[in-house]
Structures are given as C-alpha cells and as structure tokens.
Amino acid sequence: MAADKTLLSGSTTMLILKLLEDKDMYGYQMIEELSKKSNDTFNLKAGTLYPLLHSLEQQGMVISYDDNVDSARIRKYYSITKKGRGLLADKKAEWQTYFTAVNRVLKGGANLAASY
Amino acid sequence: MAADKTLLSGSTTMLILKLLEDKDMYGYQMIEELSKKSNDTFNLKAGTLYPLLHSLEQQGMVISYDDNVDSARIRKYYSITKKGRGLLADKKAEWQTYFTAVNRVLKGGANLAASY
DNA sequence: CCGATATATATAGATTATCTATATATAAAT
DNA sequence: ATTTATATATAGATAATCTATATATATCGG
C-alpha cells in the first residue's frame, strides 16, 4: 500500500461510509473508487473490506441488496443508513480534530505552545 | 484518549521524533508535551511510549542517557540521531500524502475523480 | 479454444500498534 | 501520614490491518 497501513488504520470506516454517502456501491467497486479518488494512495485489500462491510451491516450502518446485472454475476450493493450517516458525521469530526492536532505538532517549533 | 486510538495508530513514532527534533526529552515529558501541543487531543499512555522508545533506540533512531537532576530521581533523556531524522522526514512525507488523500476523498463529491 | 488475468465475494490466521493493568520508586501536596 | 503526581518498565488484551487461500464468473490474447 502506498500509505503506511498503520496510518490508514481507523479511517477506513469513514472513507467507506463517505463513498456510500454519494451513491450505493458494491465492495469491489469501493476498492477501485478509493484507489482512484486517492490517486492510488489507498489500495484497500479485499480481506480488509469485506469483513468490515459485514460488521457495518450488523451494526445497522449499511444495508445490502443483491443485484444480478449480467445474468449470473452477483454483485452485493451496499446503501448507507441514517445511523450510518450519523457515524460518518462523528468520524469526520474526529478526523478533523486529529489531523489538525498532528499538523500543529509537526509545524510547531519549540515554543509553539506559548500561543495557546 | 480524545482522538480515536486507531486514528493515532502509525503517527506516534513521527510525533515523538518531531518532539526530539526540537530538544532532548525524557519519556514522561514527551507525554505531557504531546498533550499540551495537541490541545489535549493526544494523551499517549506510558505503556505505549516506553516500549516504543526502547524499540526506536534498538533501531538507532534515538540514543538515551541518564540524568540525575535532583539527587535520587532518575530521568532517561532521549536524543534523536541522524538516522532518526531520516525516518522523521520519511514519516512526514508519508503523513502529507496520507492526510491529503483522506481530505480529497472526504471533500470530493460523486464526480471529483473527473478533475484528475 | 484455452490459459491467464480481471472481476467479485468470503474467511482464517498472522502481524502490529495501540490499550489496560500492574509493578516499582521518589517527590509533592493535603 | 496518606494520597496524588512524577518517572520508568513489562505483560497481556484488544483491534484493525494484512496475507493467504478459496470459490466462481468474465474477459482478453494467442
């Protein structure tokens, strides 16, 4: 993965929910879309995504439905729920706090703390 | 912890090395300084920090020396090495890539990808 | 036509970075 | 004198990723 996997840790749920906020998607599509939208920074593995989707469904954050586009091939589409939108909003707020704090530490010289 | 521990995951090493770039510090001081500089967003636990410092020392990223400030009390100061500065630079570049990508996904609407 | 690669989902087990809990010891505050 | 803060350390638990493997269909090149 382009980005350190440990950095990605914790934001995957937020990113997936964000994708679903725009439109219903199936798993494989999410992996591709995340890769494209992040300029190949995120290359989520199937072994990470599918268990995560199952977990989100169990928690009521998303619901799924099967779609048989071309005859046999089955795609499992996911749709974000109201509860899922709530979680997304929380995660976004958390992310905002987190990345602002990291950047403050990184930019701050020895006496930055004095400005607060 | 104010920030989701999973979000913090992966950036702790970078943040610690950044603190040491400014000045030599001892463990307990790093915890307090991180908390202060991040406006209480990061409250690193001792059980996380000390093993991490030992690991960084083993890898040659930092070196340590004991300082007996007031008689008995021992503080173990850490100093960043040239190798550690190299790692910090790498981690900073990675972080820049990562948080830019996350923000792009978060801000991007359904057709953002078209702009690339 | 056939083999390789891409699409699509799924699960088990390994890895890793955090956490909590616990231990030890001195200093400061009430 | 007892509690709280300072200071470091390690063991074990938790959680989120990864790799590896499995299954099945679709597409592409030779």
Image (tube, coloured by chain):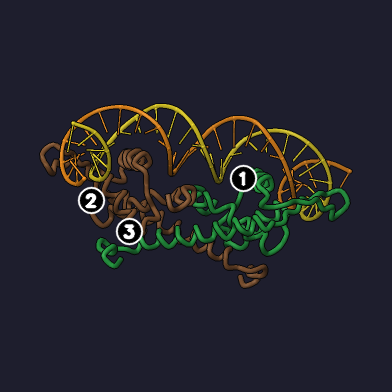
Chain colours: A green, B brown, C orange, D yellow
Is A80 positioned to the left or the right of A4 in the image? right
* Type of amino acid under label 2: Asp
* Type of amino acid under label 3: Lys
Residue C30: image quadrant is top left
Residue B91: image quadrant is bottom left
| Dot 1 crowding, Cα within 10 Å, few <14, some 14–19, many 20+ | few
* Type of amino acid under label 1: Thr
Is C18 positioned to the left or the right of B75 in the image? right
Q: Mark 2 — residue?
A: B24
Q: Marks 1 and 3, Cα distance to the nearest angstrom?
A: 34 Å
Where is residue B41? Give x, y as percent.
Answer: 40, 55
- SS at mark 2? loop
For this rendering, which residue is in front, A102 or A5? A102
One can see residue A85 in this view: yes
Image position of A6 with respect to D10: above or below: below
Q: Mark 3 — residue?
A: B37
Please, which residue is most extreme toward the bottom here? B115
Give the chain of mark 3. B
Q: Residue at x 55, y 58 (%)?
A: A90
Give the chain of mark 1. A
One can see residue A46 in this view: no
Where is residue A109? Give x, y as percent.
Answer: 28, 63
Is A83 positioned to the left or the right of B26 in the image? right
- SS at mark 1? helix
Same-chain status of marks 2 and 1: no
| Dot 2 crowding, Cα within 10 Å, few <14, some 14–19, many 20+ | some
Q: Closer to the camera: disc 1 or disc 3?
A: 3
Q: Residue at x 24, y 49 (%)?
A: B25
Q: Mark 1 — residue?
A: A48
